[in-house]
Amino acid sequence: MTRIVVIGAGPAGLAAAASASQSGADVTVVDEGERPGGQFWRHHPDFTDPRLQHQLGRFASLQQALKNVRMLSSASVWRVEAGTPLRVHALVGSVDAAQRRGETLEADAVILATGAHDRVLPVPGWTLPGVTSAGAVQALAKRDGIALGTRTVVAGAGPFLLPVAQSVAILGGEVVEVVEAASVRTLLAGWGRRPWELGAAAGKAGELSSYVGTLLKHRTPYRLGSAVTRIHGTSSVEAVTVQRIDADWRPVAGTERTVECDTVALGHGFTPRLEAAIQFGCAITHDRFVQVDGQQLTSIPGVHAAGEITGIGGADAALAEGAIAGLAAAGVPEADLRYREPLGARRRMHAFAERLKTHGIRSGWTSWLDDDTVVCRCESVTRGTIVEYADASARGMRLATRAGLGPCQGRTCGRSVEDIIGASESRFDRRPVLSSVRIGELAAHRASTPNTTAEGESA
Amino acid sequence: MSTVHITFDGERLSGREGQSIGGILLANGHRTWRTAAGSERGIFCGIGICQDCVVTVNGVEGVRACQRTACEGDAVEREERA
């Protein structure tokens, strides 16, 4: 029986586990959450407003299909090893507890479904209380049933801003404005091109029009070609500057407006969580996703990948890719009819994913930073300090400035630092330890496995 | 729906069973619970990535408030980073 380990229990991971299990494989899902679902199905059964959670029916049917799957929740993967067998090391226990239990899983195939997190571009004032990622607004609304403030500005880029604005409205908050970086012209060029391809992603279009309907109902302005370029306040957020930006995202002088608010939700796109794939040795594409073939197989034998780490495409693309990866990892031959439905869905959703690139970050954003704007939130490193060491080696700059050396290990600031110094290649994607591990836990692991090759770098 | 109680620097707070520590702090009007280089921090990413919201829970440092589900009697304390 093929032993398969799936890393991640969001849409891609659950779809992969379901199809692999139904194809006869012995499947274990390892996930850091307390409950399966990932960031997409983050609802709490007791107190999530049902209007906030999409595709609950799909979630329920997937769970039915997971009867024979071992679900290892509250498990953080901190190391993976290629080879025969493949190995996945996890720490299992309450979030950030002091003595979690170590578990090593051996597998014939691994499916990486580690997902993505918000990319938030630094803005002067973004460390003020009341500023969060757009994803935080969603997570708090779904998981905890709470709204962050009373007057919220939602800003950044991409259609994900719309469900965030809708969540705020559903929980009774006021969305003062939604501020989108892409201009009308860019949107029409991106989304208006070959519209028949999108017709196939009809469910998506319906979902988007429901968000726009919510904005209209609440008379919320949707500002295009604009950005929040400054956040004001003394002890917490009091207002933002909304400004027009050009096609390269450079602020246009003289277009500043002040908008009063107590909460700002920022999301400029997503960063894929690549570290496990990189540790396996998987090839990464030039636009920094995991490279996969038609069967979702990476460049490493036995290692498949699905969902946002292979390209930002949303939950529907992730579900299709996961289903394909699960079949392939379980050894179902390529010509099998079970591939037909997910292959079609993947093709349709990739047309949607292509359009998301319309909202991609442009390099001019760095010109809205001041020298004293904090870029690395963990270590409070400013733009000025980063620029001072721009010509140093990757390691030299990190040691001199400490940018990216804090507890988040550059997950929040890494790509922004690269933009600021104009780095030609990734400086922060590679991480020797994949999640936060306490030194004592690392020591316990080494004591129990004398032949381990774990490197001595701490998390 | 059952209620859960925690303390935050000695102040007794209540929340709904299943809520995160961060959710309970926010629901009780606390927007920040940590200082970094002198500035106040609380929830930022909300999904366990940024580590901005860490608190000390029952004497254990560095616990992400947005990820840890509150347990009855949890003693939560502020943290400070230079």
Image (cartoon, coloured by chain):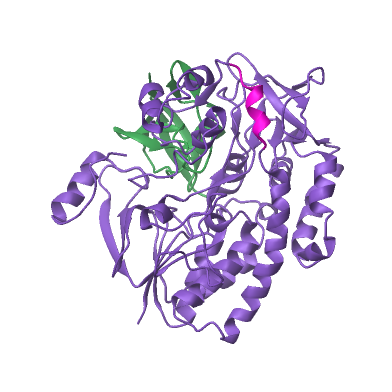
* Quadrant in which the C terminus of chain A appears: top left
Residue drawn at the location 62% of the way across and 27% of the way down: A366
In the visual, does B26 lie left or right of A93? right
Residue A237 locus on image (x, y percent): 64, 21
In the visual, does A454 lie left or right of A258? left
Asked if residue A439 is positioned above or below residue A446 in the image, the reply reads above
Q: Is residue A368 magenta?
A: yes
Q: Is residue A227 magenta?
A: no
Asked if residue A256 is positioned above or below residue A288 in the image, the reply reads above
Q: Main secondary structure of the magenta part?
A: helix
Span of residues in magenta: A362-370
Colour of chain B in the image: green
Q: Is residue A213 visible?
A: no
Asked if residue A128 is positioned above or below residue A286 in the image, the reply reads above
Q: Return the residue nearer the eye: A191 or A136.
A: A191
Colour of chain A in the image: purple
Residue A105 locus on image (x, y percent): 30, 64
In the visual, does A190 lie left or right of A459? right
